[in-house]
Image (spheres, grey):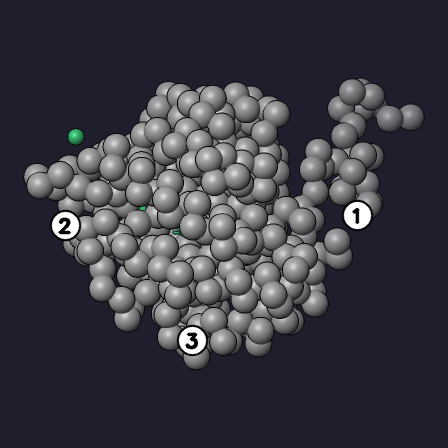
Amino acid sequence: MSNMEISSILQGGYHHPLARQWQAQRQLTKAMLMYPIFITDDPQANVPIQALPGQRRWGVDRLKEFLDPLVLKGLKSVILFGVPFNCQKDGRGTPADDPEGPVISAIRKIKELYPSVYIATDVCLCEYTSHGHCGLLHEDGTIDTEPSVERLAQVAVAYAKAGAHCVAPSDMMDGRIRAMKRALMDAGLGNKCTLMSYSAKFASALYGPFREAAGSAPSFGDRKCYQLPPNAKGLARRAVKRDTDEGADIIMVKPALPYLDIISDAAQIAPDHPLACYQVSGEYAMIVAGAEAGVYDLKTMAFEACDSMLRAGATLILTYFTPQFLDWLEV
Ligand SMILES: NCc1[nH]cc(CCC(=O)O)c1CC(=O)O
Ligand SMILES: [Zn+2]
Ligand SMILES: [Zn+2]
């Protein structure tokens, strides 16, 4: 006869692989993955990105070769980032909504090739401004909020008109969600385009590889006056609340792994919204580098990271691991 207390025994509940799956409140599926992809303005481009092993900059004419195998494996959604090299950048980010530019061309192309793939577009100006900041600036280099918001809303509407299913502002200007929702409604697209807000986006060291990939590092200063301070739990909570009030359809927390408490807070503040988190470039690069250094097995670590995001409350994950997960997951 055992001397153990009945209440001591937990292992009976997870001795079998299937029983272990039942312990999850939410399991990772292909439908929860959104794949960030970089579109450049050379239509033939297929260029590896040094800082993001396994990721490339693609030209519009190469999208079929890039996406065919992924769609076959069950890719459901992408988020597009424009990476222009052959355009004239200026203070207003004029190339952002160039009808012949990489993002609008890619929206059209992907819709034509894969009508069922959900297309989100990052909306920001830093890839298109001469100064590399995410909004318009006063002469002293500080953000000029109202014209920034107006310009960003214009860009969002252009992407939505081109057929994007979702626009996702990552600029962090105050008031942009309300302005964009209003502009989408005025364009007759209020009910045809999802507004996903990068609500709690922190001024993180983990965006380094992305800025190299997108050529979007600011030419002076930093983003600390518009992205959130990493220590700011309260501001993050207020930003989530504000953006739900302003009409966001999806809330996002970014980066993901070092901000699980913020994901958990957002899940509690906005329980009726889908909650996205962005496993950013630096998180991806760290996991890949750790695996290469023999610290852990890549697949085990990638699942552990994403399971922790789901546990915290995320319902959607933007991740550069999407192609691998499509191989690893059954549904
Ligand atoms: N505003 C642009 C933008 N949109 C997404 C990221 C980061 C994504 C990543 O690191 O994977 C950034 C960089 C930044 O804000 O500096
Ligand atoms: Zn930006
Ligand atoms: Zn002003």
For the question of whether residue 50 can be seen, the reply is yes
The answer to which quarter of the image holds residue 231 is top left
Identify the residue under disc 1: 17
Dot 1 falls on a residue whose secondary structure is: helix
Q: Which mark is residue 43?
A: 3
Q: Quadrant of the N terminus?
A: top right
Question: Marks 1 and 2: CB-CB under 8 Å?
Answer: no
Separation of disc 1 and disc 2 at Cα? 52 Å
Q: Earlier in the sequence, mark 2 or mark 3?
A: 3
The answer to which quarter of the image holds residue 233 is top left
At 42% from the left edge and 23% from the top edge, which residue is drawn?
A: 242
Separation of disc 1 and disc 3 at Cα? 46 Å
Q: Which mark is residue 208?
A: none
> Percent x, y for residue 230?
33, 34
Identify the residue under disc 2: 220
At 46% from the left edge and 65% from the top edge, which residue is drawn?
A: 105
Which is nearer the eye, 27 or 84?
Answer: 84
- Identify the residue at the far bottom of this view: 44
- Of labels 1 and 3, the one closer to you: 3
Which three-letter amino acid code belongs to the residue tagged 3? Pro
Residue 99 position (above or below residue 30): below
Q: Earlier in the sequence, mark 1 or mark 3?
A: 1
Dot 2 falls on a residue whose secondary structure is: loop
> Percent x, y for residue 20?
76, 41
Q: Earlier in the sequence, mark 1 or mark 2?
A: 1
> Percent x, y for residue 260?
49, 34
- Of labels 2 and 3, the one closer to you: 3
How packed is label 1: few (under 14 Cα within 10 Å), some, or many (20 or more)?
A: few
